[in-house]
Amino acid sequence: MPAGAVAVILLLNGLQIGLPQPAFVQDGRAWLPARAVLTAAGYGVQYLAARNCMVVSGQGPTATIYLNSRQVTLGQENRTLAGAPRQINGTLHVPAGFFPLIGMALQWDAETKSLHLRTQQRTPVNVTIRQLKADPFRYLGRCVEVLGEYAGAPPAGRSDWRLRGRYELISCMFGEISPVAALPQPPLALPCGYRLEVVGKVCMSKDAALRLDILEIQQPPGLAALTCILSTARATYRPGEQVLIEVELSNHTDHPIELGSSVSAQLTIAKRSNLQYRAGIEGYPLQRSESGVGRASRPTAQLWEEPLVLPDAIQPVDTQVLTYRWVPDKQAEPGDYLLELYTNTELWAHQWCFTIQDTLPAEGAEQR
């Protein structure tokens, strides 16, 4: 750092990022290493040595920063920086005032001596809950859109509620709900399994748990709005004992949901220990080849498969229950088994786990 400069903490969307040289304040002006910050924020960066300039591309107009010049080109406009960008130990530093010019929010916290930069997000990123949990730091501080189902309130004493995807749960709290697409009743009064399309900001609680701060909530369109719940009559079975399976289809909307002949659906059962999933994929498990390279597929250890015979339509505020039976081989190994639904449409269901074991629990044991 230059003489008289003081290093400061730099946070991008609430997170500290790796920097080749520290951000610093000198003579009341903050300086940031340009390439590292811009790349971490998702901008394209190219340094043109012949012209001594850095070209920055992102969502808005392309910006060009010139070494040792306060002039910046922003699309067809020229802007003036508070100081001229300069090289320090081989790293180009620019005044912090450059970043608001390209749409980033900048805030100085004098108490913690930290600079806070936030990227401007025009549209939410469509992700699954599994993707959020697999790579939380990628999405922290960002606005995302998630499809899930209301999974009830957490233990007493907490003000959040839970949203469940096909494989994972995430905690949610309400900010300002958009009045454009309000639900027909307060969210916490909804039945468990009610399908929701949620737009929220990804945050981290004090206990380091991932959370969504809700900005907007609405009912998803089409088949995605159809609640589909898988279950077995009991949580635990003996080897060879018949497993009774129920598929509950509920339409909580005010209009019929057409399924039609184009919807293909199958129930599958596989032993849980034989399944491997790739983080971030909210679909089929991952089948691994000998080389270790995976591809999306159905379970390789699938023990049972049954086509789901669906009705033509589910009427408003109507529930239909489909029943199936699986009789495992008497030699079925004790352990956890997964019941899952695979379809060629946006119809989906949270996976269901049950156990085969030699000794059944006492009567009244809790169903999982």
Image (cartoon, helix red, strand yellow):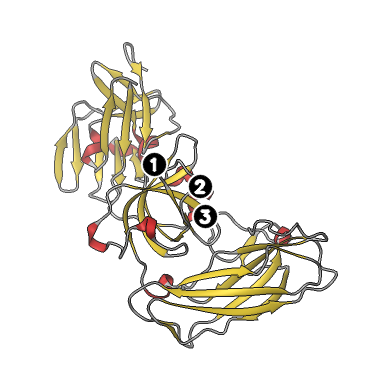
Where does the image place residue 72, in percent across and percent down from the top left? 20, 37
Residue 222 appears in the figure: yes
Where does the image place residue 64, in percent across and percent down from the top left? 25, 41
Element type at marker 1? helix
Which residue occupies 45% across, 32% down? 18
Front position among marks 2 and 3: 3
Front position among marks 3 and 1: 3
Number of marks present in the image shown: 3
Where does the image place residue 349, in percent across and percent down from the top left? 53, 68
Residue to which mark 3 is pinned: 130
Disc 3 to disc 1: CB gap under 8 Å: no
Amino acid bearing label 3: Arg
Disc ID at residue 135: 2
Front position among marks 2 and 1: 2
When the figure is inspected, residue 82 is found, relative to residue 263, above or below; the finding is above
| The quadrant where residue 342 appears | bottom right
Disc 2 to disc 1: CB gap under 8 Å: no
Residue to which mark 1 is pinned: 39
Amino acid bearing label 2: Asp
Relative side of 359 to 258, left or right: right
